[in-house]
């Protein structure tokens, strides 16, 4: 089944829809990386030392055709990372505009993360890597702090969840054949959470993997959807 085009708007025309009784504005942002388009998502990496060399560190990101196990005629955002010396956060981020400045919204976030990792021991990638996603008024960025490339939002470390994380969980695939499997994850079990746009009418998204696995991991973001309703 083909994925939807970049952005699906829940209105007859334009971004917003209203009824005669009250403001009932809603918007759906739908990124599916169709035809290799990054849809405004930008990759970043954090947690590694400024002195890390190519023996210790490897990072690759690109939109590419999905692997076996998924629809190989469709595209996803592929993230490869390896840091042999410590924890590594590999993420993608996106800015969405057009919100009412400083206004609250109900939001449900859905992320389809494709993995081929299964739980096969205490030192496996499944035990060492945690999926995390969230939204922020601030742009998620990596900054150099005391010699470490550091993520600026509170994501927590490893399985610990920080205050800026709205969605988290296991990277485990349910396929025993180790082909890739896309798992749908929703904030708050599909129930809305409240987020507030910044004073420019922006909300920043991020989604990534927090890894203490010392070997290479490869993930595909298959689709990311956020549904908003103005309060």
Image (cartoon, helix red, strand yellow):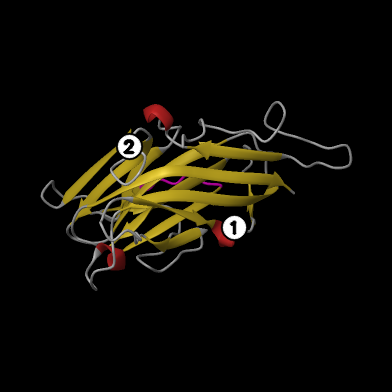
Query: Which percent across, then down, holds residue 70?
Result: 35, 44
Q: In the image, which residues are magenta?
A: 137-142
Outermost residue, left side: 55
Q: Nearer the viewer, residue 32 or 193?
A: 32
Q: Position of residue 161 (x, y in %)?
A: 44, 66
As for residue 212 lying within the magenta part, the answer is no
* In this rendering, position of residue 120 left or right of residue 44: left
User: Residue at 52% across / 50% down in the picture?
Assistant: 110
Q: At 30% across and 64% down in the image, what residue appears? A: 126
Q: Is residue 7 left or right of residue 65?
A: right
Q: Earlier in the sequence, mark 1 or mark 2?
A: 2
| Eye-nearest disc, 1 or 2 | 2
Q: Which residue is located at x 26 percent, y 62 percent?
A: 125
User: In the rendering, which numbered label is found on residue 77?
Assistant: none
Q: Is residue 9 left or right of residue 181?
A: right
Residue 53 higher or lower than 98, as above or below: below
**In the image as oriented, which residue stretches furthest toward the bottom?**
122
Query: Under tag 1, what secondary structure?
Result: helix
Question: Pointer 1: what residue?
Answer: 190
Which label belongs to residue 72? 2
Spatial CA distance of label 1 from label 2 is: 28 Å
């Amino acid at each position: 089944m083909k994925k939807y085009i970049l952005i699906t708007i829940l209105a007859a025309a334009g971004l917003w829809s209203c009824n005669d009784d009250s403001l009932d504005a809603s918007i759906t942002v739908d990124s599916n990386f169709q035809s290799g388009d990054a849809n405004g998502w930008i990759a970043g990496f954090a947690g590694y030392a400024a002195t890390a060399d190519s023996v210790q560190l490897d990072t690759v990101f690109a939109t590419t055709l999905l692997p076996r196990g998924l629809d190989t005629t469709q595209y996803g955002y592929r993230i490869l990372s390896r840091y042999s010396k410590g924890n590594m956060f590999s993420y993608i981020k996106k800015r969405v505009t057009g919100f009412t400045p400083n206004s609250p919204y109900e939001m449900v976030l859905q992320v389809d993360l494709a993995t081929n990792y299964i739980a096969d021991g205490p030192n496996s990638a499944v035990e060492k890597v945690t999926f995390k996603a969230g939204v922020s008024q601030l742009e998620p960025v990596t900054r150099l702090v005391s010699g470490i490339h550091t993520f600026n939002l509170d994501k927590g470390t490893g399985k610990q969840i920080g205050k800026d994380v709205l969605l988290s969980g296991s990277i485990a695939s349910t396929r025993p054949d180790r082909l890739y499997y896309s798992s749908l994850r929703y904030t708050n079990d599909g129930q809305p959470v409240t987020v507030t746009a910044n004073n420019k009418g922006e909300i920043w998204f991020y989604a990534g993997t927090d890894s203490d696995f010392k070997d290479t991991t490869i993930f595909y973001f298959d689709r990311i959807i956020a549904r908003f309703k103005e309060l």
